[in-house]
């Protein structure tokens, strides 16, 4: 029987963290966006005059707000996550966000409110942490691994996972023969359902 487990990042794969953060930073912290902000992955590269340390501070502050409980879904995620669940798939979310109890509660609430009871586990690895040690237990299982961060996607591929990179302006330059680049969840569904 085919493995019915999907490993997935959360932010910018299941939920639209980046847009929500940008709106918060502009409104609540009066940060000024650079014109090319959508093409930048790192927060400090999205805003005028923001350094690495300040970026970390704002990300930590935002991730501790109620906004984490109400992040919107990314694109068409609700429809196709539901359809994958109907095919018997379950999800293990491996997300780089601070591993604090109140953040975990908000993240779990957000995901279950959006997608229902489709999650076997939700693992918070800490912000800016490498996900390799969490993916290692799935090495060579050929589970699907959904990610938006190029480095984390490459790690999953190196560990023998069927890796899918969710396309955004900041990773559109990436090319890899064995990592699937998708525009939306319909394409994710088509890949997985046809496997």
Image: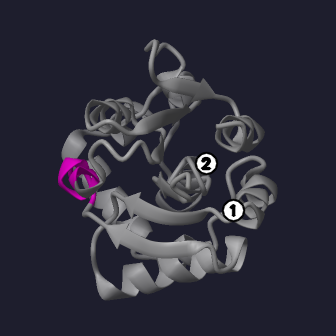
Answer whether residue 25 is visible to the viewer in this image: no
Residue at the extreme front: 1
Is 187 left or right of 147, judged from the image as shown? right
Classify 108 as above or below 195.
below
Which residue is drawn at the image coordinates 30% and 42% (left, top)? 140
* Residue drawn at (72%, 34%) of the image: 187
- How many labels were placed on the picture? 2
Contact check, label 2 and label 1, Cβ < 8 Å: yes
Magenta segment boundaries in residue numbering: 127-136
- Up the image or down, 55 lies above or below 150; here it is below
Within-10-Å neighbours for mark 2: few <14, some 14–19, many 20+: some
Q: Earlier in the sequence, mark 2 or mark 1?
A: 2
Q: Mark 2 points at which residue?
A: 19
Q: Residue 133: within the magenta?
A: yes
Percent coordinates x, y for residue 176 in the rendering: 43, 14
Which is nearer the eye, 23 or 188? 188
Q: Where is residue 133 in the image (x, y as percent from the top left)?
A: 18, 54
**In the image shown, does 14 or 161 lie closer to the viewer?**
161
Q: Residue 87, position in %: x, y?
A: 74, 60
Gap between marks 2 and 1 measured at Cα: 9 Å
Q: Quadrant of the C terminus?
A: top right
Residue drawn at x 25%, y 39% as measured from the top left: 51
- The answer to whether residue 88 is above or below residue 51 is below
Please rate how many residues cluster around mark 1, counting C-alpha atoms within 10 Å: few if below 14, some from 14 to 19, many from 20: some
User: Left or right: where does residue 155 sit relative to residue 116?
Assistant: left
Give me the disc on residue 72.
1
Q: Is residue 175 visible?
A: yes
At a point 27% along the width and 58% down the height, the residue shown is 127
Magenta-colored stretch includes residue 49: no
Disc marking residue 33: none
């Amino acid at each position: 029987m085919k493995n019915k487990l999907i490993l997935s990042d959360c932010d910018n794969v299941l939920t639209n963290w980046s847009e929500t953060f940008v709106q918060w930073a502009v409104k609540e912290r009066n940060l000024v966006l650079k014109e090319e902000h959508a093409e930048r992955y790192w927060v400090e590269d999205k805003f005028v005059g923001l350094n690495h340390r300040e970026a970390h501070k704002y990300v930590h502050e935002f991730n501790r707000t109620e906004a984490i409980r109400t992040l919107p879904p990314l694109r068409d995620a609700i429809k196709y996550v539901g359809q994958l669940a109907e095919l018997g798939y379950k999800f293990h979310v491996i997300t780089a966000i601070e591993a604090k109890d109140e953040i975990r509660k908000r993240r779990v609430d957000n995901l279950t409110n959006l997608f229902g009871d489709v999650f076997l586990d939700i693992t918070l690895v800490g912000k800016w942490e490498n996900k390799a040690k969490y993916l290692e237990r799935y090495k060579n299982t050929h589970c699907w691994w959904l990610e938006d961060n190029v480095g984390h996607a490459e790690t999953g591929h190196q560990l023998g996972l069927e890796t899918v990179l969710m396309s955004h302006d900041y990773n559109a330059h990436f090319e890899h023969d064995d990592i699937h680049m998708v525009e939306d969840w319909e394409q994710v569904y088509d890949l997985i359902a046809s496997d």
